[in-house]
Image: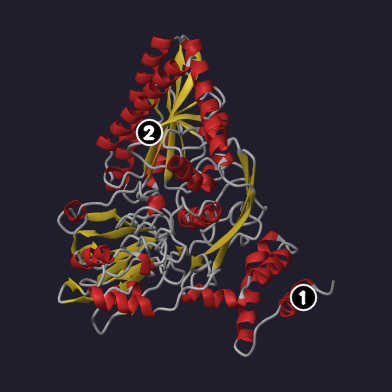
Amino acid sequence: MDKVTLQIFANQCRAACAVMAETLYRTAHSTFVRETFDFTAGLTTPDGEMFAYSEDIAATWFVGLNMGNAIRKIGHYEEGDICITNDPYGSGFVCTQSPDTHLWMPIFHSGRLMAFGCCHVHNTDVGGAVPGSLSRTLSDVFQEGIRIPPLKLFRRGELNRDLLEVFLTNVRVPDQNWGDLKAQVAALKVVERKVKQIIDRFGPDAFSEGIRALLDLAEQQARAIIRSIPDGDYFFCDYVDEDAVTGYPLRLAVTMRVRGDELILDFTGTDPQLACSLNIPTGGNERHTVLLVALYHAFRTLDPNILLNNGIVRPIRCILPEGSIVNPRYPAAVGMRSLTGARLQDVILGCLAQALPERMPACASGSISMVVVNTMDPKAGRIAVATIEPMVGGGGGGPFRDGTNGVGGTISFLHNTPVEVNEAEVPFEVLRYELIPDSAGAGLWRGGLGTVLEFKVFSPGSSVTARNRDRTRFRPWGVAGGRAGKPSEFVLNPGTDRERNLGNVDVVYLEPGDVIRITSCGGGGWGDPYRRDPARVLADVRNGFVSAEAAEAEYGVVIRDGELDPEATARLRASRPTPADGERFFEFGPERTAYEAVWTRRMYDILTELLWGVPVTWRGFFKGKVFEAVDEISKTRQPTPDDLRAVFGRLKESFFGPA
């Protein structure tokens, strides 16, 4: 195709996906799909490569998704078939958590298979141990709800009622699940009709040629972006607060290697797989879509015209140590992969910030707590379960602008749910939902503000599952002199004599009248706060984003009676010592600085080497025991690599005998 025709073809395919997504959105039953937009819609080649995607409505996780493994599990397709799976392992690692229910439909022209329409929704609940199906506490995939391997939900247009009944019998809100499934089916039938119209316009051979050209063009665009990144090795790591309930930090480490127009992400140094649900099921796929989401966002930022399809992953390769968090063995629990995946985005953006310091932002909140309320609806006489809000926090400040308030950068595709909709869906009362002053990291360009949600329940037996709770310890980092954002909180009955800080607990059982308060992080700041225009600081104070006290302490801006005091501001800013050359590019906050004073990069490199010398199922256990021993040593002196090796040697001998 010539370039003009190819652009017309790309627009038509993208428009077909947009209509598909709009249909799903307008006909879905659950609030989480209808209001939050945690769903996807796209078209794949007969081999499963995503060549067109809904870009304006729906999630951005699966731009680079390859459906091939799931498609091949079925084998033979006929007109009217619609297939389903939500099994993280049985789908060939296409699904990555059990609530993510994928449907796909073959699209034929004169008996020739031309493409597949594909969509997924995040179901509010698919059964399992806890309402909402997901919790950090779960230790294997069997606890995370019913799993359906790739099967035909419709065969030649006829519904497989036996399969549907098994699925709906095992979930807590079957009406919602069936409603969302019907919305997915409607969306697939719409896109089938649209694609057939495109084939009629271009012809089947040109259609197939156009698909190949779209994938090739996206690859070329991605390679051009990678060539704009200076060659080099860029290392970054970040942490999830806990690798299990009351556990030790979970480390995610990446070395980004840029060579010409190719990019490698080496995850060596990332922690071993865990007996909790923070694992990411990739099957060792070196281009697995969940690992690359940060690059999709960065590529689109660096080239707004880049096509979003599977071609952009071709120049990228990941190195995934087997038995690690990013390549776990069955039957590891994987339901909280969204938390680990969000932190991986922070890690990869940390590499890019070093490579392109004048183009990349500071860290966004990285805490994406999905709040599921499970309670009794006395009027309806039934259980009400709903995902009421994604608490995503503030975006990171960038080289040219402040971070966005209440929208967490890499998770900004998720929409908030109006209070009125939540209260209509669930019998509870929202007491407070607003931005948090002084929560953002200060900077030349400050981070975005975090949010707070406070609500009361009225029925006994109520529970809240706040999955993905994190960033209560390790803050969103600032860059280029910017400060780290404020951490998140999870509090039961705030301001009363029954107040309890829940930290990163993600399932809490409530009594009538209990109040929950959840806060999200502010984003990190970009650049020296003392270089921020005092007029901008004054505007932030007047808007309630920054207090007058914080303006003076963090920005060196003095405000008296709501007005800027220029002379006092000039004196205060002049009195600050000039920042030393070579100051740290990243500002992590005091918690991480103290942690890494003990667990240096060298210490962690040695730990990684030692852990990979024991069987997979022992690694997480050994890590916990080593941390326990090193913590004890650090109470009296600085632990050394020799201490680490000695501790590990004694552990290994006690469980496996002398070498």
Q: Quadrant of the C terminus?
A: bottom right
Q: Is residue 465 above or below residue 303?
A: below
Q: Position of residue 89 (x, y in %)?
A: 56, 45
Query: Which corner quadrant of the image does residue 388 belong to?
Result: bottom left
Hey, which residue is sitting farthest bottom in the picture? 636
User: Camera-side residue: 508 or 94?
Assistant: 94
Query: Which corner quadrant of the image does residue 575 belong to?
Result: bottom left
| Mark 2 or 1, closer to the camera | 2
Q: Position of residue 243 (x, y in %)?
A: 53, 66
Left or right: 23, with 319 as reference point: left
State the residue at coordinates (55%, 56%). Answer: 354
Hey, which residue is sitting farthest right in the picture? 659
- Is residue 589 something that shows in the picture? yes
The number of discs equals 2
Q: CA distance from mark 2 to mark 1?
A: 53 Å
Question: In the rendered structure, which disc, 2 or 1, sits on the residue that comes first in sequence?
Answer: 2
Disc 2 residue type? Answer: Ser
Structure colour scheme:
secondary structure
Q: Which mark is residue 455?
A: none
What is the secondary structure assignment of the residue under circle 1? helix
What is the secondary structure assignment of the residue under circle 2? loop
Disc 1 residue type? Answer: Gly
User: Camera-side residue: 128 or 527?
Assistant: 527
User: Camera-side residue: 482 or 614?
Assistant: 482
State the residue at coordinates (46%, 16%). Answer: 108
Q: Which mark is residue 649?
A: 1
Q: Position of residue 421 (x, y in %)?
A: 19, 51
Q: Is residue 175 above or below residue 277?
A: above
Mark 1 crowdedness (10 Å alpha carbons): few <14, some 14-19, many ≥20: some
Q: Tell me the residue that label 2 is attached to.
A: 54
Left or right: 580, with 156 as reference point: right
